[in-house]
């Protein structure tokens, strides 16, 4: 599993993904880890098939006791079906996830980890000295869904928004926005159901100062590409399955 | 009785999964440091060349460190692959244990002979699978141990060589302070590698059943 440091100041961001050992039939995912002082949080820790690679990748940079928090943007299996394993490895950790999904997510097996329900209007997660802002992103695509914003690093973790479906081994960052559109279009039109939800999110995100937008699938956006994405997404027709 | 044997069966893979991930994490760090060591060795070689005939004895030594670095990088990659195998294997064992546990529970709950037979045949298959996994697991552990031994041996030799390096450096006149500085740097890097290797070795007790 590829492991790369995205940001390195007082706290650090890592991305893990592009796992060459992943079975082809499983969608490729990006997992993120933020380290602040002696604590670390995993963002969308991933599916059960990736668990051992993911654990080994994390332990390249932190010890197992340092991982105190998990964040699951929504309930999908590619996000958090590894929970039953993390539950054994991190018995003292806390899982931050939408209140809406608690009864569902527990089906992945959770006995020891504490479920910290996120309210519909978001909130914040304190990780050592770092305050992370939870940005509501309901119905994009999941009906209870949040993103995570780091105001110091100016990084937005945008879950399934900004996702692209690509061949294995593709580069980590978007190089050319125009040519990247093809890889995102169908995903956003088919998975994202609501025009209102889309505009609510775009309006929230336009108010944030963002250097990097990092989705859970595919390539990451830097600098001006974030605005390019927001402009493109704003014009895009979503929820297309219903019109067929 | 080993620490592992005191645990219930289903906890074994959990402990082993963490241990394998830890070994791989430590070796990754050792490999990163070895990259710096490789650079330091190259720099010291350049310095030795500049010092000319007075530093002839040093050439062999800086070559040794360059080789140590490249061997460490190579071995750490091998070890990493091996640790990933162990990790995957222990997760597979873990899942099989969980399946066996659930099958046993459903067997206890059911009075139906049909289900009882089904559960029994699945249980048999699962425990055969578990046996196979355990055999693979043990051979991976052996391989990992031999890699760790190799790397440890090299590091041990480097301690002796570093002392010689300083001795030889005294012959090099104005180059001596710079060469000493390089020896310190190489020393420090080898020490850090050594720490990560010892740390890895300390996790091995969690892997040996
Ligand atoms: Fe999703
Ligand atoms: Fe997803």
Image (spheres, coloured by chain):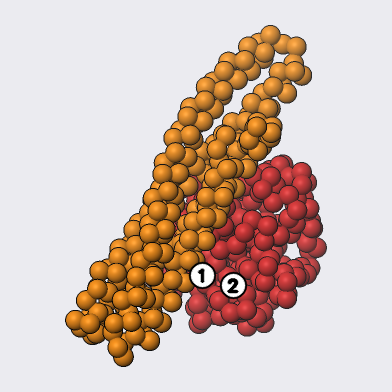
Chain colours: A red, B orange
Q: Chain of mark 2?
A: A
Q: Left or right: where does residue B140 sit relative to residue A92?
A: left
- The residue pinned by badge 1 equals A5
The 10 Å Cα crowd at callout 2, few under 14, some 14 to 19, many 20 or more, is some
- The residue pinned by badge 2 equals A12
Labels 1 and 2 touching (C-beta < 8 A): yes
Q: Nearer the viewer, residue B177 or A100?
A: B177
Above/below status of B42 relative to A71: below
Q: Nearer the viewer, residue B199 or A193?
A: B199
Residue B14 lies, in percent from the top left, at 63, 41
Q: Is residue B196 visible?
A: yes
Query: Disc 2 beta carbon < 8 A from ligand 2?
Result: no
Q: Quadrant of residue A155?
A: bottom right
Above/below status of B17 relative to A223: above
Q: Left or right: where does residue B68 sit relative to residue A11?
A: left
Residue B2 lies, in percent from the top left, at 63, 35
Q: Is residue A164 visible?
A: no
Above/below status of B113 relative to A92: above
The disc, 1 or 2, on the residue closer to the chain's N-terminal end is 1
């Amino acid at each position: 599993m590829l492991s790369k440091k995205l940001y390195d100041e007082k706290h650090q961001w890592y991305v893990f993904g592009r796992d060459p050992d992943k079975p082809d039939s499983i969608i490729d995912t990006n997992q993120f880890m933020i380290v602040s002082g002696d604590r670390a949080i995993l963002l969308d820790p991933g599916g059960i098939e990736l668990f051992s690679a993911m654990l080994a990748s994390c332990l390249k940079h932190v010890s197992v006791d340092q991982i105190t928090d998990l964040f699951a943007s929504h309930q999908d299996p590619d996000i958090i079906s590894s929970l039953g394993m993390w539950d054994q490895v991190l018995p003292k950790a806390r899982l931050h996830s939408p209140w809406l999904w608690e009864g569902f997510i527990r089906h992945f097996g959770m006995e020891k980890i504490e479920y910290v329900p996120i309210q519909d209007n978001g909130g914040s997660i304190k990780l050592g000295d770092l305050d992370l802002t939870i940005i509501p992103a309901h119905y994009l695509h999941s009906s209870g869904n949040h993103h995570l914003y780091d105001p110091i690093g100016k990084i937005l973790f945008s879950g399934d928004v900004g996702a692209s479906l690509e061949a294995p081994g593709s580069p980590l960052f978007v190089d050319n926005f125009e040519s990247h559109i093809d890889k995102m279009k169908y995903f956003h039109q088919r998975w994202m159901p609501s025009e209102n939800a889309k505009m609510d999110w775009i309006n929230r995100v336009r108010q944030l100062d963002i250097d990097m937008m990092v989705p859970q699938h595919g390539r990451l956006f830097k600098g001006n590409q974030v605005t390019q994405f927001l402009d493109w997404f704003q014009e895009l027709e979503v929820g297309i399955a219903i019109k067929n | 009785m080993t620490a592992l044997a005191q645990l219930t069966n289903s906890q074994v893979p959990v402990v082993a999964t963490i241990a394998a991930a830890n070994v791989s994490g430590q070796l990754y760090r050792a490999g990163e440091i070895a990259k710096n060591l490789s650079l330091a060795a190259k720099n010291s070689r350049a310095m030795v060349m500049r010092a000319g005939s007075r530093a002839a004895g040093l050439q062999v030594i800086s070559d040794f460190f360059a080789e140590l670095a490249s061997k460490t990088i190579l071995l750490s990659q091998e070890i990493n692959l091996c640790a990933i195998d162990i990790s995957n294997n222990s997760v597979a064992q873990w899942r099989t244990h969980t399946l066996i546990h659930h099958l046993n529970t459903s067997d206890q709950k059911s009075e139906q002979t049909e289900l009882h037979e089904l559960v029994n045949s699945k249980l048999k298959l699962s425990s055969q699978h578990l046996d196979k996994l355990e055999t693979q697991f043990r051979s991976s552990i052996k391989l990992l141990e031999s890699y760790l031994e190799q790397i440890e041996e090299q590091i041990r030799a480097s301690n002796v060589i570093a002392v010689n390096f300083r001795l030889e450096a005294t012959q090099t006149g104005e180059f001596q302070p710079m060469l000493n500085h390089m020896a310190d740097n190489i020393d420090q890097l080898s020490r850090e590698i050594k720490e990560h290797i010892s740390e890895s070795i300390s996790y091995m007790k969690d892997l040996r059943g």
